[in-house]
Amino acid sequence: MRNLKQLAFFICLSAYCTLSAQETKKAMTFDEMVSWKRITEQAISHDGKWVACKMEPWRGDASIFVYNAKGEMTASFLPAGHAEFSASSKYLLVTKKPELEKVEALKLKKTKEADMPSDELIIFNLPEKKETIDSLKSYKLSESADWIAYKRSSKSDTVLHVRALDGSKEISFSNVNEFGFARKSNVLYYSTDSTVCTYTPDKGSSLIFEGKGVFSQITFNETGSKIAFLHCPDKDSTNTLYSLYLAENNAPARLVADKKAAFLPAGWVISGNGSLRFSKNSERIFFGTAPAPLQKDTTRLDDNYPNVQIWKWDEDIQYTQQVYNKQKDLKKTYAAVYNINSNKLFQLADKKIPNLLTDDEGNATIALLSTNLPYATEQMWEGRSRYDIYTINLETGDRKQIKEAANTNMRLSPKGTYAYWYCVQDSSWYTYSMENGKEYRLTTPATFAAWDEDNDVPDYPSPHGLAGWTTDDRNILLYDRYDIWKFDPSAQVPAINLTVNGRKEQLSYRLIQLDKEQKFIDTKKPQLLLAFNEKTKGSGYYHVTLSAPATPKTLLAGNFMLKTPVKAKNADAVIYTSETFEQYPDVRLSDLSFKKSVQLTHGGEQQEQLNWGTAELVSWISLDGVPLEGVVYKPADFDPAKKYPVIVNFYERNSETLYAYHMPEPHRSTIDYHFYTSNGYIIFNPDVRYVDGYPGESCFNCVMPGITSLIAKGYVNEKGIGAQGHSWGGYQVAYLATRTNLFSAIESGAPVVNMFSAYGGIRWGSGLNRSFQYEHGQSRIGGTLWNAPLQYMENSPLFTMDKVETPILIMHNDNDGHVPWYQGIEYFVALKRLQKPVWLLNYTGEIHWPMRLANRIDFQKRMFQFFQHYLNKQPMPQWMSEGIPAVDQEFKLGY
């Protein structure tokens, strides 16, 4: 009996402790949000025995932690910048940053930049020996050997230090400007004001070129046996006097071409703005040329020259796009090629046909040229480009047009055997043989569902894409919604579904490219797939050999979100993350079987004392009869007997992110889910499916019955429901405010409220006219102002603003390049004119969303205070009740 009483006592004590632990869970603060550490870098050594992870707060000093294969943390560095392993896996290089607090204190003292503390470089001989190099300016690590080259930060120190990481050999070179290693050998180049040299540890230095002037685009081939560069003898004439040089096997460089070269069009020059690169086989050099730039009249005063823009109705490219692209266009170059073995030069691209596409390695004889310039005007309202496409022989320069006004640009198979493309008009894949010039149709809508079956914009649906090509371009592997299919690029053999069960099980299989340098898919070797389960919203890793149809073997799958793993270069070790809304995406180490994994990081410890949250998939039927899904996020201490404030936050469709962790952060445009659930809010994220011409009505039909279904569950405070959205989401919540009084408060970020004025406006972030997004894109009207004027009016909240009874907080910035700022102004002025409660936040100089951390934190604080007042009956802060006059802006925040 006594034992039973003792047992009962301990059970009660345990229950009490559990309840006490729950009660001690606290709400997240803004300080905790800003200091939240997320994993911003992760690296695995080539031998798979070591892992480095960077944990970084939104504001503060980052740390780098080093782990062994047992999951033990063996070293840490604070504050740290970047880490990378050496070729042998014996060393880890870590840049150590000055402490943020120290840097900010010096800035307050107006310390000169030259006197600010510098980075340090730590050479960590694993597992424990450390060496520090102070005053680091820059360094480069050889990819193929344990060698490093670095410079210190002193202006007077131009010495390049080159050394073995173990310190066994070291050499230095004076007055060095640029330096770099070849990718697949331990060859280094370095340049001064008058020389280009190479250095190899076993052979020493070789003088490649000598002559005063400017060197540009110094480039090795992969092995370092060849080096090319541009040289201009006069630093004031680099726009017109660059020459191309080539050196082989550390011998002195020879002139390949200068401005007098016969291949150059009249008035053209070799450009320092182009991209200089070798083909993989080192038989070609691709470089850039351009018309000689116009020279400014130095005898003219700027005050005497008019500052005028001339917009012409039939210009191919709208003037606003020209202005946006001006600096890029001033540096625009056109590809040329030098065939080393035949000593022949050809101009490949020009102003009329500017775009060159070679195979992945630049080895193939035939490449593609394309232009969309004849169709640039139509692109403003079509929302997509058309192209004229040509083949070009890299050894002869011969061109041949193969497509006119093609609806998409072509791409090339890895070896350049075929060109391939997807035609949106007939939802089909095609190939073109570069050898015989024949075109093949691989799919039809009747034989292969290549398109996005969920497309709901007034445009042709996009394809699901391709997995890649098999060895030597033998087959192309294409995706449908679920499976991987093998196609004969000459369309002689029927297509084969290689993954068999994707559609049946609603598993979307996608190939993971573990080796980033691999150009082909080897069907004889096992491949790793990442699959998304449409039914459960979970994901998994799967194993398959793509030589024949087979059901992929499950390695790791469940109700969590997996992302692409990172594999060790020379071992079967991988690092990966697994996450849910509740589970932090900590880094794990495993082999490719995923049977056993070791957790390395422990970022989840940050949330242990916080009232976290849960995510739940819900479903309902829209007002027009469409089955829908969404996610409800609840506080961890949720009590169904209580009434909770709710914030409805959505964009388009997000139920597939059910298991996403939502890393806490001071977001630039949306509420932080964990912050709000921690502070006792429920968040509802509903999917929206659209009908062409009626985006606002579609939103209403989808969202409102979803909210009603939540209210019916009994735990929603009906007087405490808010909505929040940004950009397209900002438009949607602005529309809802004109149709319902259900919401107690709405935050609408960068919304379009007047589709008439927005249609004719400019996306200043690109210079494009906005019409395409209404006719064919996200805004989903599906017509012009002239053939669908009623849809533009019905979907514009501005015209029914008198119906709004909900307090509104607008955030719209005056340098927004996506949605014109005047949309926010129209919104604010309309509500002000109607004497509706409205506030507008303008983070001056910011773009579509605040980018400065201080502004993001401020936005989060004000938005939370806004919702706290209207949803939780908290007192109004000063900035809402009294405002902050312009004269007080620099002195008061009004929180």
Image (spheres, rainbow, N blue to C red):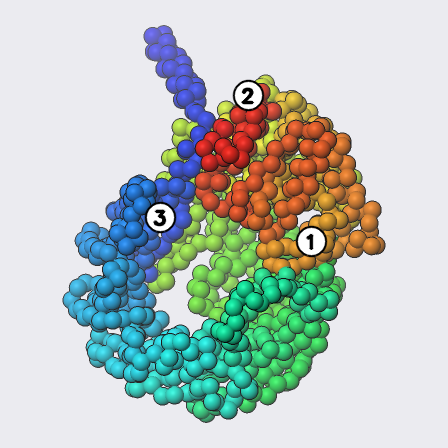
The residue at 24%/56% (across/down) is 135
| Front position in the image: 200 or 18 | 200
Amino acid found under the numbered disc labelled 1: Gly
Q: Amino acid at mark 2?
A: Gln
Q: Residue furthest top?
A: 1
Categorize mark 3 by other alpha carbons within 10 Å: few (<14), some (14-19), many (20+): many
Marks 3/1: CA–CA distance: 43 Å
- Label 1 element class: loop
Of callouts 2 and 3, the N-terminal one? 3
Q: Amino acid at mark 3?
A: Lys
Q: Which mark is residue 54?
A: 3
Q: Name the side, left or right, on which 526 lies relative to 97.
A: right
Task: State the image coordinates of residue 668 (x, y, percent, origin top left).
Answer: 52, 42
Q: Is residue 241 visible?
A: yes
Is 833 in front, or is 702?
A: 833
Mark 2 residue element: loop
Residue 684, above or below 657? above
Which residue is found at the position 40% from the left and 28% from the top? 609
The residues tagged by marks 2 and 3 sit, at their Cα atoms, a distance apart of 39 Å
Q: Which residue is mark 1?
A: 761
Q: Which residue is mark 2?
A: 874
Numbered disc 3: secondary structure: strand
Q: Nearer the viewer, mark 1 or mark 2?
A: 1
Rendered location of residue 832, percent (x, y): 68, 32
Quadrant in the picture for residue 374: bottom right
Q: Quadrant of residue 406?
A: bottom right
